[in-house]
Amino acid sequence: MASTDTPQAPVRSASASRPRLLLLDGHSLAYRAFYALKEAAMSTATGQPTQAVYGFTSMLANVLRDEAPTHLGVAFDVSRQSFRTERFPDYKANRSATPDEFKGQVELIVEVLEAMGIRTMRVEGFEADDVIATVSTRAADEGYEVLILTGDRDSLQLVTPDITVLYPMMGVSKLHRFTPDAVAEKYQLTPQQYPDFAALRGDPSDNLPGIPGVGEKTAAKWIREFGSFQELVERADEVKGKAGQNLRDHLEAVRLNRELTELVRDVPLEVVPDDLERKAFDRSAVERVLDSLEFRNDNFRDRLWAVDPGAAAAQGGEEVPVEDGFTLETTVLETGAVADWLAEHASGAGRTGLAVEGTWGRGTGSVTGLALAGSDGAAAYLDPLVLDEADDAALAGWLADPDRTKAVHDAKGPMLALKAQGWELAGVTSDTALGAYLVLPGQRSFALETLTHRFLGRELKVDEATDNGQLALDMSGEDEEDTAKGEALMLAAHAVVEVADALDEQLESRGALKLLRDMELPLMTVLARMERVGIAADRDYLDKLEAQFGAAVKQATELAHEAVGREFNLGSPKQLQEILFGEMNLPKTKKIKTGYTTDADALVWLATQPGIPAPAQDLLTALLRHRDQTKLKVTVEGLVKTVTDDGRIHTTFHQTVAATGRLSSSDPNLQNIPIRTDEGRLIRRSFVVGEGFEGLLTADYSQIELRIMAHLSGDEALIEAFTSGEDLHNTVASAVFGVPTSGVDAEMRRKIKAMSYGLAYGLSAFGLSQQLDITPEEARKLMATYFERFGGVRDYLRAVVDEARQTGYTETVFGRRRYLPDLTSDNRQRREMAERMALNAPIQGSAADIVKVAMLGVDKALRDGDFVSRILLQVHDELVMEIAPGERAAVEELVRREMAGAYPLRAPLDVSVGFGATWEDAGH
């Protein structure tokens, strides 16, 4: 039968009497995965590319789902040296050097496989194909059904009725199934004849020469005619014509080809097929590896969990040893029962878990269900719609009581929903998402399901069984619908309590419990208030701005069409490549898989090249204008969509996204509102003072990162530069270049400013050279001159990396840790990126913490002073506030006091304040 694409459902399941073994060629598939996703530009924050790891793991999940093997192994090459290179030194010698982006990814794939309990195999002197040939032959002899997943066609010689080769097509997304019949249909040869055919054909990828004038058709014809390679060689004189003469002239070469093409089936291995039986994943280890790789896609993780043999066992397969289950005393509370339950189970010293079902966002929400889990093992579910006045009062009092301690997961959303219901939430001593973030700042998923498995070793699933680490419920409610609805929520409430207890231990050991209790939890409450309030927006102005940018996009499009002489799609890289590099014959940019890049940096570079003809210059100008205006138009369109009925924009703030501790925002992302261009600043004019208030006040820190660097380094010269009252960059430039401050020109100041901020951000000499458009050598000299003058900075930067390499982490001035395991990596690229992060994290993290302390101080001072004025936004280092009539002077004074006093730096914090009717007008 012909080879076909692998279907989405399992082809067939292995019977209990016949196990199924799947073998993978690790290097072959890793390379295919890498090139399939090469343009995806996937990498970690440390700069380690991860396309191959993601593609390989994704392909593995698919094939495990589709083939359902009982046994599994992955073979890897040890190096390019093998018995074949000893026999033929030029074997594979024509292969290009391993791409830098691929280096290190095989080791990461092995880490993933080990966490998944998958055995890897490699033997010195042999290739992965030989290992696979040995294991597959032995397994078939022992009664296994064998599948081989490889991108090397030499493995087709292994195909038998018991051994099938799965060959990837279209990268790694489709597989062809090669059975004996499929091999025969493709090549008109048996699998046993395939290496004979390959020897005659030659293999450019392995640097095995073919016979001149002899292609695949002729090679296959000869093997069919003579039956085998050996028979052909012995009767070579019978082959007629020039092809026959070429055969005879190259007999020694094709004999060597045949020898090298034959796979070894008796590689000395310690592993036997039975050793490859699939095992349950070490899910905590898998989570750690995926977190380190920064794979944020929850769907990707779900696909892995779906093929975990441990999960399959929990759903009815063989028993997998995990933590014993637990039983909750649960109930669905009826009308009038809330006060008694709270008094009995949620009023003691222990912490109560709270789980809320509902919706939240845009500063509001609603509650459709609520579950409580006491520390005594009791849990309850209640429907807000069936509460009477007494129930409502009892619940409201309990929720708002700061002495009734509570644990909640990702509490800001539930807090907004409860507030919309008329209930205040206080007494939260643990938010499991925030706690996990402080323990694992580099993690990307803080879902309760993930944390439950990671910290408790259990699945967050309702199940009647009690021997698999899941929940057994003893429901006492009479309403079956409510009972079913409440089960998962009560389980979540109980899990929150246990996860919170586990996190507290780890937070305590890391010295981070104070950060959670004194900074992140109070800040969560402040952010919830800010989200509820939002900021007023001028909808009419936004509509006009959207039209203005839309017109600019249209004009840029018309100018581009005029420059080319016809219409085309400005958003099509393919069409741009044809025009720029084909029709206009412009200098080639960076080579990519689809041709040459046409990104913004490439267009700017092209525009600066000498000799560019006028039509091409006009086109490049129009393209850059089109992209700039399109970006602005999209930003405004996003803002328009988020203006709610109250005329305000309610962004959502996130505390667990940036590993440095900085806040981020979404829906809309206000961190991305442009401020450095005149047209970008127009967007800030759309944020206005709300009705009943007299203006917006903005306050931010001046050069906070550089002040922190001066403080941490203790460099007296740099501290003096801050305290002298002179312009910082002029003062530093004067010291570095050896001229009086009056002699510092704009270029000197620009270089020093870039240098100073670059050091605070962990910028390398190469990065500085790119930023200043100078050579790396000039950048190194500039840095050396700077360090001669500011030796304390140099010593600090060296020490912080050395210390982090010893401890594994950096710390902010408030003790927030950033873990950097790549500091000891064997991969140079990963190690150097981790070193830059070690330079950056204490400074950036300290700035983030100082801003948070300032926010808390300002908020408390406003509330203690009964001010009507309020905080609306926090963007980067800036606070945006709405000022009530008559309060401006007092609020400005308290803002300056609280922000300047947030932390006692040796280079004191300096606060700039502005006031106006719009966000832009309030700038300073």
Image (tube, rainbow, N blue to C red):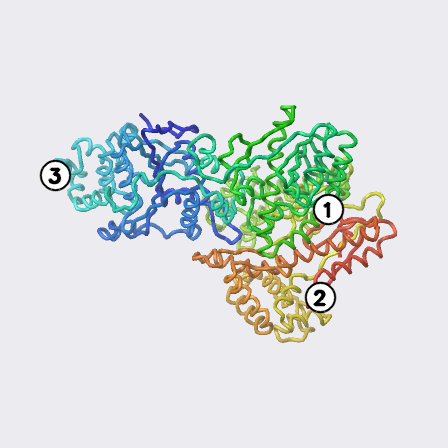
* Disc 1, SS: loop
Q: Type of residue at label 2?
A: Pro
* Disc 3, SS: helix
Earlier sequence position, callout 1 versus callout 2: 1
**Residue assigned mark 1:** 403
Callout 1 environment at 10 Å: few (<14), some (14 to 19), or many (20+)? some
Q: Is residue 509 left or right of residue 421?
A: left
Q: How many marks?
A: 3
Callout 3 environment at 10 Å: few (<14), some (14 to 19), or many (20+)? few
Earlier sequence position, callout 3 versus callout 2: 3
In front: mark 1 or mark 2?
1
Whether pointer 3 and pointer 2 mark residues with C-beta atoms closer than 8 Å, the reply is no
Towards the viewer: 583 or 109? 109
**Residue assigned mark 3:** 234
Across and down, in percent, residue 639 comes to: 70, 41
Report the residue that reaches farthest toward the front.
344
User: In the picture shown, does residue 89 fall above or below 6?
Assistant: below
- Using the image, tell me which numbered label, if any, was put on residue 908: 2
- The answer to whether one can see residue 454 in this image is yes
Across and down, in percent, residue 505 comes to: 58, 51
Q: Quadrant of residue 346?
A: top right
Across and down, in percent, residue 554 comes to: 65, 39
Q: Looking at the image, which residue is at 63% across and 36% down?
A: 378
